Image (cartoon, rainbow, N blue to C red):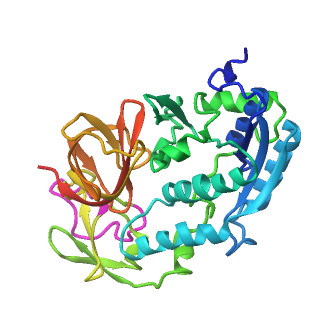
Amino acid sequence: MNEALAGIAPGNGETVVVGMSGGVDSSVSALLLKQAGYKVVGLFMKNWEDDDTDDYCSTRQDLIDAVSAADVIGMELEVVNFSAEYKDRVFASFLREYQAGRTPNPDVLCNAEIKFTAFLDHAMQLGATRIATGHYAQVRAFDGSFQLLKGEDGTKDQSYFLHRLNQAQLSRTMFPVGHLYKRDVRRIAADAGLANAAKKDSTGICFVGERPFREFLQRYLPVTPGEIRDLDSDRVLGRHDGLMYHTIGQRKGLGIGGLKGMADDAGEHEAWYSARKDMEKNVLYVVRGHDHPALLSGSLVASDLSWVSGRPPHTHWVYAAKTRYRQPDAPCSIDAVDASRCEIVFAEPQWAVTPGQSVVVYESKVCLGGGIITGAKPAA
């Protein structure tokens, strides 16, 4: 038996709709499902139209790549436009969060509202029993429910972005490449003759793509310049173009490097980092040094909670959590949790915990869910 199919149950003609992005992961997902005996239908989602003609939108090339892959695999491909849903359910929230001084993660909301809601509903209308995507994650039936697991390739695991999925969504979702490593996915694609086998992974805002961030935000939010101040001395160091352009822990783009008279006792100039936003006064506070106490948090509070099982985790239990995607798992416990908020305490101080980002809780490889960070407390 093909080792790549070992993590996929036999299809026996069951219809699965695969979200085709034009990338190698979704293409190989469709290929493996067909090899496993499923009737596979591809669905290419168009979700952004505001500036579809500029250099940063890759929709046309992505569609060409998806059509090419579908032709090689021998499957149908449908194109559907979810631009209105994306703008209402994801992008509007994205703008509100930035305007409030927080740093949102649109990929989390995009998955919950578009890829696993609008897409899932459309797939069911097409007569599918399940959907599939190219995410590096896994689903496991356990004790009468479904668990969301990390992808086998730890460097590509995407469970962080999927933590808001619920039982109904997971019960109808497959991740055909979740048990594979990226290098194996590319090899499978190359062996099958898929033209996107070596295609670069997409980055940037979910569905909006890679573009100059400041220029993009300026189209939708007013520019409100203000002061940059040293958190320790309250000295004015410069001016910012808008708090929405800055996030906690940011080093580049502050425009205050090389200030005179700011060297330490040894004559060294430590880097400046953004540490706090005062929305009322429109002031950005910065500190010197990566390990400044203002950048370290011992605990955080999160709201807008979503637990995969439908039930909150135990309090005073040893878990691990991420406060950003690329962060290693950090040991923690949940000190308090109710329907609206939870407080997470870390075993070691965490760097640059950022309001608006998601905190995601794990028990070993099982993703339990999480919420949106609303605040953090300094490390003791």
Among the 4 quarters of the image, the one containing residue 135: top right
Q: Is residue 252 visible?
A: yes
- For the image, the number of numbered tags is 0
As drawn, the residue found furthest toward the top would be: 1
Left or right position of 89 against 76: left
Q: Is residue 291 magenta?
A: no
What's drawn in magenta, residue-wise?
252-274
Percent position (x, y) of residue 130?
Answer: 66, 42
For image coordinates 61% across by 37% down, the residue present is 175
From this view, report whether residue 34 is shown above or below residue 359.
above
Q: Position of residue 293 (x, y in %)?
A: 18, 54
Quarter of the view holding residue 368: top left
Give 58 or 359, whichever is nearer the viewer: 359
- Left or right: 147 with respect to 12? left
Would you say 146 lies left or right of 369 here?
right
Decide if residue 271 is in sight here: no
